[in-house]
């Protein structure tokens, strides 16, 4: 029983055990997560086909705090909000809205966020969120998969050379910093909670 308790993500500390209260809390957290994703998307530096934002950091923090199921559900809810035309994405509404925007230059990255959340959430569900090195490895794997998906989609639209130049290269250092920051923050929170 103790092993199962120590292998839950951070969010498990706030969730009621069962019933309507648990579902309501999960829904609230998912909606709060989509708000954080929207705010992180709007905090951007314009580069071209794909802009730099804080969204990678937000995805990693949400997934590692929420775990696999709630983390992925939050990302899917975020994509559903965008598909409905809500201006939640980085370039909305100025670069379009809804499905049309999602099929544009950032489409592969948006889909990659879900996979990245699944990988980071899976790691958190196994207790890796208490160890910065294990969590960094999982988050880096998720980052690489997300970037590969974004690159592949963008390459279909503008070609592989431009996709590498505009969709991968400018993000390598910044995303490594975001991965390192996220992999440090979550274990630090666990360490603080242990002391308390």
Image: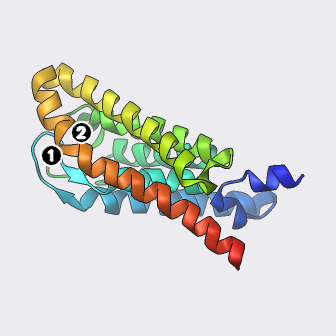
Residue named by callout 2: 101
Quarter location, residue 193: bottom right
How crowded is the residue under tag 1: few (<14 C-alpha within 10 Å), some, or many (20+)? few
Residue at x-position 36% and y-position 50%? 56
Q: In the rendered view of the protein, which quadrant contains the C terminus?
A: bottom right
Does 194 appear above or below 2?
Answer: below
Identify the mark at residue 34; answer none if there is no mark.
Answer: none
Q: Position of residue 62 (x, y in %)?
A: 50, 55
Relative depth, front residue between 38 and 10 = 10
Q: Secondary structure at mark 1?
A: loop
Which residue: 18% across, 48% down? 51
Name the residue rendered at 69%, 77% in the picture: 195
Question: What is the x, y in percent for residue 25?
Answer: 66, 63
Using the rendered image of the protein, determine whether residue 25 is visible from the camera's viewpoint: yes
- Of the image marks 1 and 2, the number of the one nearer the N terminus: 1
Does residue 196 appear to the left or right of 170 in the view shown? right
For label 2, count other residues whose C-alpha is less than 10 Å away and answer few (under 14), some (14-19) or many (20+). many
Which element carries disc 2, helix, strand or loop? Answer: helix
* Residue 132 position in % (x across, y down): 54, 54
Q: Is residue 27 left or right of residue 93?
A: right
Q: Is residue 107 above or below residue 123?
A: above
User: Which residue reaches farthest front?
Assistant: 133
Circles 1, 2 touching at the beta carbon (< 8 Å)? yes
Q: Which residue is mark 1?
A: 95
Total marks placed: 2
């Amino acid at each position: 029983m103790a092993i199962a308790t120590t292998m839950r993500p951070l969010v498990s500390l706030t969730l009621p055990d069962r019933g309507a209260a648990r579902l309501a809390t999960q829904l609230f957290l998912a909606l709060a997560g989509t708000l954080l994703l929207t705010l992180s998307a709007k905090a951007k530096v314009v580069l071209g086909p794909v802009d730099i934002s804080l969204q990678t950091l937000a995805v990693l923090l949400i997934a590692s705090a929420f775990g696999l199921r709630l983390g992925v559900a939050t990302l899917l809810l975020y994509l559903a909000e965008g598909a409905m035309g809500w201006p939640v994405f980085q370039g909305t509404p100025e670069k379009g809205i809804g499905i049309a925007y999602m099929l544009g230059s950032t489409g592969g990255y948006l889909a990659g966020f879900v996979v990245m959340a699944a990988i980071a959430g899976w790691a958190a569900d196994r207790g890796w969120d208490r160890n910065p090195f294990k969590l960094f490895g999982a988050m880096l794997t998720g980052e690489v998969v997300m970037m590969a998906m974004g690159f592949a989609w963008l390459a279909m639209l503008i070609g592989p050379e431009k996709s590498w130049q505009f969709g991968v290269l400018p993000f390598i250092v910044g995303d490594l910093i975001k991965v390192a920051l996220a992999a440090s923050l979550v274990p630090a929170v666990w360490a603080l909670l242990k002391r308390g």
